[in-house]
Amino acid sequence: MAASSNNIAIIYIDKSRFDYYSLGSPTALSLIFPLDTVKDLEIINPPSLNTQIKSFMDQNKITPTPLIIILSENIIFSEDFPQGQVEQQKTEIQKFLDTIPFEKVNSKVFKLEKGTKVVATNQEYYDTIQKAFEKLGSITLAVIPALVLGNINTQNGLDTPTLQSIIEKFELFKQYSLLIPQNSSGKNQEGKTSSLLSPKNLRLTILLALFLILILILFALVFLTLLKKPQPPKPSVVSPTLSPVQTLNPTLPIVPFETKPPSTTSALPLNTP
């Protein structure tokens, strides 16, 4: 391991608390979760839990250190499957994972001598605790289900011999870490961050993809409808037909001009003096 075993701390996560162990401390330090923060393996109030973990570290003068997280058997769902055809076994495993009542499930497949064991848990439960410590400077080396530790007794927490055994055999236990994803055959895939068999996430992704496709189809139909929409006919411009204007010359009645004969003017006699 890159980190010295003397500097490694172990966090044991249970239903309603976690215990913090280090080789330099004779007793475990525990944080019990309030019901308004954690209930039924669900983190109800993540900001509140982050604040509680920071106060826990400050009060106990805990410095950031490499962490190994052990998940209690009380928060693990497990099922054994007999040997069989690969596709049939995948179907049975999928059915088992579908029964786990959490949105984000992380699971691990372990090949046994006579079959397969699948373990699963609510990823958001341990992930929120893990990230709270990492924000304060710690690093997480592994997240290991307690049931893969063999004969090590973890029912009542961890004692000093158990701690030493976990650290001494860490290279062996590390392959069971939930931080290491697997492919469909159950083999570990180092260096990748996706988790194995998260059916609820897969269904959500498929539903979102279908929703986006339907939206695109709707937009396409609207667009095509607008293109094919008949344009209103343009009003035809009727050019007026110009007919020649008939100029009417009014006929005036012709009044005959009466010609009077010139009047005969009688010359007045001149009075001669």
Image: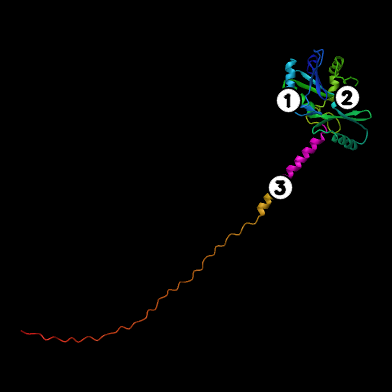
Helix, strand or loop for disc 3 = helix
Kindly identify the amino acid type of the residue bearing the numbered disc 3.
Answer: Leu
Residue at mark 2: 147
Residue at mark 1: 48
Q: Is residue 273 above or below residue 194?
A: below
Q: Nearer the viewer, residue 74 or 223?
A: 74
Q: Is residue 265 left or right of residue 250?
A: left
Magenta stretch, residue numbers: 196-215
Cα separation, mark 1 vs mark 2, equals 30 Å
Task: Report if residue 202 lies within the magenta region.
Answer: yes
Residue positioned 84% across, 19% down in the render: 170
Label 3 Cα crowd, 10 Å radius (few <14 / some 14-19 / many 20+): few
Residue at mark 3: 218
Q: Which is more N-terminal, label 2 or label 1? A: 1
**Image quadrant containing the C terminus:** bottom left
Predominant SS along the magenta part: helix
Residue positioned 78% across, 22% down in the render: 140
Label 1 Cα crowd, 10 Å radius (few <14 / some 14-19 / many 20+): some
Q: Is residue 82 left or right of residue 55?
A: right
Q: Which is more N-terminal, label 3 or label 1? A: 1
Cα separation, mark 1 vs mark 3, equals 43 Å
Task: Report if residue 112 lies within the magenta region.
Answer: no
Disc 1 versus disc 3: nearer the observer: 1
